Amino acid sequence: MKKKLKNRSELNKKYSLITVGTVLLCIAIFSVVQFVFMDDIFLSAAKYRMHEAYKDISVIDFDSKNYAKELYDIETNRNFYIEIYKPRDTLFYATHYNDLDYNEDEPTDLKARIMKILQRTENVDGSYFEIRQEYFATAQYIVYGCFFDDMALEIYYSLDNIKENAEIAGMVFFYICLIIMVMIVSLSIRIGFMVFLPLRNMIDTTKRMANMDFSVKCPKYEINDLNELSASINTLGSSLSSALGKLQSENKQLETDILYERRQEKIRKSFISNVSHELKTPIAIIKGYAEGMKMGIGADNTEEYCDIIIDEADKMNNLIVRLMEYMKLSSGAYKVYSSVFNLKEITEEWTEMHRMQMKNKGIEYICDIDPKFNCYSDVMMMENIFINYLSNAISHIDNEKIIRVTAEDTGKSYRVRVFNTGKPIPGTDIENIWQSFYRADKAHSREEGRFGLGLSFVSTIQEMTGEKYGVENKTDGVEFWFDIKKNQKM
């Protein structure tokens, strides 16, 4: 929290200094105007008004009977006291403080004001300004005097009125400055909330974006420019988040591909090694018997030698055919052709080719599959799995010599189980039996022409179809199982 406030203070520092400076400037201007220039300003204004009054008086026709009324209007409108000397040393007119009788030819009881001069300033045109004070009183006046035609004019204006007006104007000016300062402060706070707070939020959002956190979005704001900036940041964040997600996904896929390629490379190397090993034995046998026949060894057993060579050649041919099938499945070149078939009927059909073999071994075969189970899959691929399981069961059967085929409904699939009585699969072998060329009983498997590819066919097919498979050791035997998709159109 303290760090956030510190960052906010740094962001607002210049703006706060400008605001404080503006307020102090307003106070300084008010102080200077109020205490230094206000009296001079009103004094200058009074001098200007007195000069303007002189212009109005100078055009009055003093031979007219209405001149007194015109002078009276000037006095009352401008709050002046006027004295006119005509000639310049004889008082011709003086301001009356009571109502004038404009029917009289001339005002009567004229008396000039007698005051002491405190200050005098003369102008180039012969006019002057004086500050005068009444004897036996504290009242002071500013006096404007000038000469025109054969007359002398003096206009009096009370300094007390000037000071009073200056104080009133100063008070008004004070309240105006106070209102302005309040408006500045309010506006500053408003701008702070409208501008700097959104900027602070945007900075925090962009910092989170720099740390790969795109969960926070900038809200909408009242100011269009800030709103556009906020929208741009949100768009940038969404684009970066999408690009980052895509990049992470691609990196993950790349890692998966690299691991897959390494695993495949390892499998290929192992595959080549196993193929070489598997081919080496029959080739050696064929070569040995062929050389023996060439050298005349076993001349009386030529037919037997030829049978052995033909048998080994058949094993090599079967191995090559199985390898081609396995490579076709593993490479993904095989196209899956799914169709609907009845599980019980197709299982009995697959079993038929092994009936004689099971009969010769004294095997009891039991098939317990619901005739209503209809599947939807590639028949040839499922046949390959079932035949491998059945062949494996026939090869490893023992004890009571029972093979039991069952099926159960697991929801979207049927799980087919092939059980045979016999010895359980050792724990060291049960995890490896799905690998190509892996044979727990190598000698026994070779005699039967089995190369350890059958269960690897099962794992490859089931991974292609996305179905599960597995093996379990039972109390009296071993059970292999695999899933087949149900016919969903039923």
Image (spheres, grey):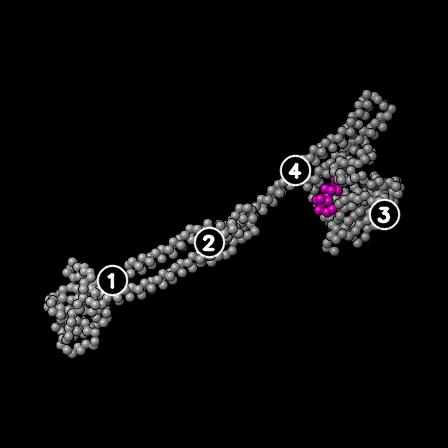
Residue 63 point in image, percent of width and height: 12, 73
Instruction: Give the numbered dot on residue 196.
Output: 2
- Could you say which disc has been placed on residue 213 in the image? none
What count of labels does the image hold? Answer: 4
* Sequence-wise first label, 1 or 4: 1
Q: Are marks 3 and 4 in contact (CB under 8 Å)?
A: no
Amino acid at pointer 3: Ile
How packed mark 4 is, by other alpha carbons closer than 10 Å (few <14, some 14-19, many 20 or more), is few
Label 1 or label 3, whichever lies nearer to me, is 1
Label 2 SS: helix
Magenta segment, principal secondary structure? helix
Upstream in the sequence, badge 2 or badge 3?
2
Q: Tag 2 or tag 4, which sits nearer the N-term?
A: 2
Give the answer, above or below, for where 224 lies relative to 260. Answer: below
Q: Amino acid at mark 2?
A: Phe
SS at mark 1 in the image:
helix
Residue at the extreme front: 136
Which numbered mark, 1 or 4, is in the foreground of this view?
A: 1
Residue pictured at 80% horizontal, 39% vertical: 426
Measure the alpha-carbon separation of dots 2 and 3. 83 Å
Give the CA distance from mark 1 to mark 3: 130 Å
Q: Quadrant of residue 20?
A: bottom left
The residue where tag 1 is placed is 43
Image position, residue 103 (x, y; %):
16, 78
Query: Sequence order check: which comes first, mark 3 or mark 4?
Result: 4
Residue at image x 25%, y 62%?
A: 43
Up the image or down, 363 lies above or below 77; here it is above
The span picked out in magenta is 456-468
- Which quadrant holds residue 34? bottom left
- Residue 152 location, quadrant: bottom left
